[in-house]
Image: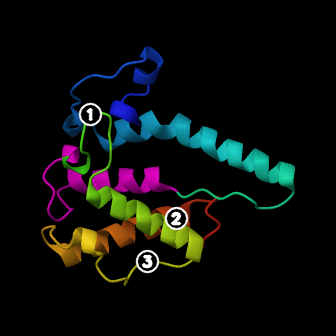
Amino acid sequence: MPYDDPTVLEAGRGPKQVDRDSRTVAELRQMHAAYFQSMDDHVRALNRKFGKQALFIVPVGQAVLGLREKVIRSEAPGFRKQSELFTDALGHAHVRVRVLSTYCHFAVIHRRSPIGLPVPAALSKEPETDKLNRLLQELAWDAVSKHPHSCVK
């Protein structure tokens, strides 16, 4: 969600700073619910139109919410604050989130878990690299395997 605020895009301009660290998991889930639902509905309608499962969803947003929840609970190695997941106020992803996204895409494309894949070079300088890598893999697999439009069981 750009700027962690669904109303910002309507206004046409975002703030220079965003307080992501005060967001709760409940707030984040509520904030994203309408967007996630609209995407699910759109993909479902298109698949119905095509008469088969032609489109899939890669639930990166859901995985990022899972990661933010881990950060809030102090269960994410190397993180102290949610804001460390982003590089700017808009919400561009830090390398950790980009790797999480990659694992989500891997799982949907290959229809298998990314758990156990080697640590990518992009994470090699992160603290507690092996634990962080495993967490990102688990979060990706959890989001993908639970999403009905990923078509991964």
Instruction: Identify the residue at horizontal 26%, vertical 68% (top origin).
Output: 122
Q: Which callout, 2 or 3, points to the residue nearer the camera? A: 3
Residue under circle 3?
114
- Asked if residue 79 lies in the magenta stretch, the reply is yes
The Cα–Cα distance between marks 1 and 3, rounded to whole angstroms, is 30 Å
> Which residue is found at the position 42% from the left and 41% from the top?
29
Residue 104 in picture, x, y percent from top left = 47, 65
- Amino acid carrying mark 3 in the image: Pro
Name the quadrant of the N terminus: top left
> In front: mark 1 or mark 3?
1
Majority secondary structure of magenta residues: helix
**In this rendering, position of residue 57 left or right of residue 20:** right
- Tell me the kind of residue under disc 2: Val
Element at badge 3?
A: loop
- For the record, the magenta segment spans 59-83
Q: Identify the image quadrant of residue 75.
A: bottom left
| Whole-number angstrom distance, CA of label 2 to CA of label 3 | 10 Å
In the rendered structure, which amino acid carries the disc numbered 1? Ala
Q: Position of residue 46 (x, y in %)?
A: 77, 48
Q: Residue at 45% across / 50% down in the picture?
A: 61
Q: Position of residue 96 (x, y in %)?
A: 28, 60
Task: Give the class, few, some or many, for how many residues have Cα within 10 Å of label 2's Cα (few <14, many ≥20).
Answer: many
The front one of 27 and 141 is 141
Residue 102 coordinates in the image, percent (x, y): 42, 65
**Residue at image coords 12%, 52%:** 80
Mark 2 or 1, nearer chain start: 1
Q: Which mark is residue 89?
A: 1
**Marks 2 and 1, how far apart at CA:** 27 Å
Q: Earlier in the sequence, mark 2 or mark 3?
A: 3
In the picture of the structure, the residue carrying the numbered disc 2 is 144
**In what element is the residue under mark 1?**
loop
Total numbered badges shown on the rendered structure: 3
